[in-house]
Amino acid sequence: MESIYGDHLPEMEQVMGEILEEISAVRAEMKEKYGSDPVEHCLSRIKSEDSMREKCRRRGLPETTESALVEIHDAIGIRVVCAFIDDVYTIRDRLKAMDGCETVEEKDYIRHAKPNGYRSLHLILRFRARYYAEIQIRTISMDTWAALEHHLKYKKNLSGSTDLIVAELKRCADELASTDMSMQTIRDMIRGDS
Ligand code: 0O2
């Protein structure tokens, strides 16, 4: 069967490489300037053939290259996990300023957390007027919470105590957010920013 991405895969990989290079450049500059790496880790992927076809079906779209490249915006996906909240915005600004990049959408679930407590900054960027990339940027605490919440969603036998679980998850998210702010303040004090 022909790839759902047609013959676009090499160019998509190039675009993903350029984004990763920009992230590496910011990391190197910040290490040079402050002696510490703003990025804890970074994950990247081109959505697999099966996941993309499944997403098309879920969204009621035909399984075509047009759907995969134009209708769905996370064929290229990158998650950047940062040490501190300020680093999230530094990475965001640098990615948005890349050559040949347009910002299609920005969702700041850090300033405006989702009702369940989910925090993360999401960007949909378009490169070369054609290729979309979904970039999720968040702190280590936010990433830990998202991973655990994702894990719990797939656990069974939650009925009966669901309200309590939802409230507890939200409480954990808020406590982590408060700790993130305290850690940011401590870093600013150490760097002499305040
Ligand atoms: P998939 O199949 O990988 O895309 P919208 O329709 O714009 O309101 P959408 O399209 O879900 O919402 O976009 P959003 O909110 O930017 O979320 C995109 C991705 O962020 C999700 O992909 C998840 O990977 C992650 N995410 C969003 N909300 C949550 C959450 O509450 N908990 C966790 N753990 N992750 C979240 P999809 O849509 O799941 O799947």
Image (cartoon, rainbow, N blue to C red):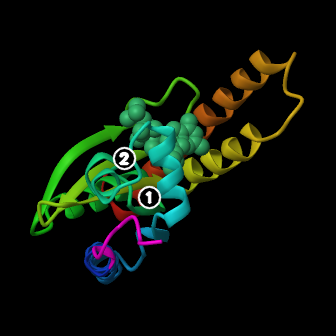
Camera-side mark, 2 or 1:
2
Q: Residues within 10 Å of mark 1 (few under 14, many from 20)?
A: some
Residue 93 visible in the picture:
no
**Residue 33: percent from left, percent from top:** 28, 78
* Ligand 1 neighbours mark 1 (CB distance < 8 Å): no
What's the residue at 58%, 27% (across, down)?
116
Residue 94 visible in the picture:
yes
Q: Which residue is mark 2?
A: 122
> Which mark is drawn over residue 78?
none
What's the residue at 28%, 50% (across, down)?
124
What's the residue at 29%, 76% (across, down)?
7
Does dot 2 land on a helix, a strand or a loop? strand
State whether the magenta stretch is mostly helix, strand or loop: loop
Q: Which residue is mark 1?
A: 187
Left or right: 51, with 69 as reference point: right
**Residue 108: percent from left, percent from top:** 35, 38
Magenta part of the chain: 1-9
Quarter of the image for residue 22 reads bottom left
User: Is residue 99 placed above or below 107 in the rendered structure?
Assistant: below
Q: Amino acid at mark 2?
A: His
Residue 7 lies in the magenta stretch: yes
Quarter of the image for residue 159 reads top right
**Residue 166: percent from left, percent from top:** 70, 24
Q: Nearer the viewer, residue 107 or 156?
A: 156
* Ligand 1 neighbours mark 2 (CB distance < 8 Å): yes
Mark 2 in CB contact with mark 1 (< 8 angstroms): no
Q: Amino acid at mark 1?
A: Arg
Q: Nearer the viewer, residue 178 or 147?
A: 147
What's the residue at 44%, 58% (across, down)?
187
Q: Nearer the viewer, residue 98 or 177?
A: 98
Q: Residues within 10 Å of mark 2 (few under 14, many from 20)?
A: some
Left or right: 25, with 96 as reference point: right
